Image (spheres, rainbow, N blue to C red):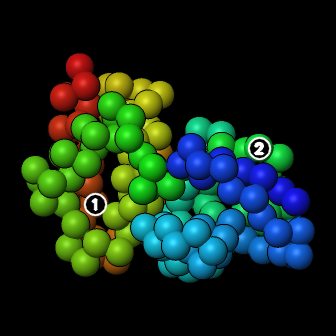
Amino acid sequence: MPTFFVNKNRVDISKDVPGDTPLLWILRDDLSLTGTKYGCGLALCGACTVYVEGKPVRSCQTPLSSLKQGSDITTIEGLATREAKAVQSAWEKLDVPQCGYCQSGQVMSATALLARNKRPTDADIDAAMAGNICRCATYVRIRAAIHEAAKSLA
């Protein structure tokens, strides 16, 4: 029986769950963590971004069999770092979301960027956020919010 830690809580997965089951479905359907969204199912849009061992991954294309026993998984519901709080505050301050569907993936990716780079350039932001699609096209506000969050972390 695979065991993981999701948002610091131990999760035991039944051995009957097929190894090719995407992590996204375990999070949403079995654990009711619906902040992680299904977008494209092909790891192209970023709506399903979570952290596995602190690294952003697309959960729609992460099969259970690819996760090591005891892996640490963080979803938007468990994101509580200093960088995360700065990003979430900037998102609210600059009124980033429109429909909001992509925002959990956007916040996860932005937080990962600021965790490793406290002073990102526009090019750094564009590279880190590539593959996070916003159908409402709030990219200018997303970039501004990341800069705002970075300023608050300085």
In this view of the protein, can residue 122 be seen by the observer?
no
Instruction: Indicate the secondary structure of the residue bearing disc 2.
Output: loop
Q: Considering depth in this image, is 102 or 147 the residue closer to the camera?
A: 102
Disc 1 or 2, which lies upstream in sequence? 2
Give 17 or 51, whichever is nearer the viewer.
17
Mark pair 1, 2: CA separation? 36 Å
Q: Residue at x 53, y 48 (%)?
A: 7
Q: Position of residue 72 (x, y in %)?
A: 65, 43
**Dot 1 amino acid type:** Tyr
| Quarter occupied by the N terminus | bottom right
- Label 1 sits on a secondary structure element that is helix
Number of marks in the image?
2
Q: Of 131 and 59, which appears nearest the observer?
A: 59
Mark 1, residues whose alpha carbon is within 10 Å: few (<14), some, or many (≥20)?
Answer: some
**For the residue marked with disc 2, what is the amino acid?**
Gly
- Compared with 142, 23 (above or below) is below
Q: Which residue is mark 1?
A: 139
**Comparing marks 1 and 2, which lies closer to the viewer?**
2
| 112 over 23 or under it: above or below | above
Q: Residue at x 89, y 68 (%)?
A: 15
For the point 72% across and 63% down, which residue is it?
A: 62
Q: Is residue 5 left or right of residue 92?
A: right
Q: Position of residue 118 (x, y in %)?
A: 35, 25
Asked whether residue 89 is in view, the answer is: yes
Tell me the residue that label 2 is attached to. Answer: 70
Could you tell me residue 94's position as x and y percent?
11, 53
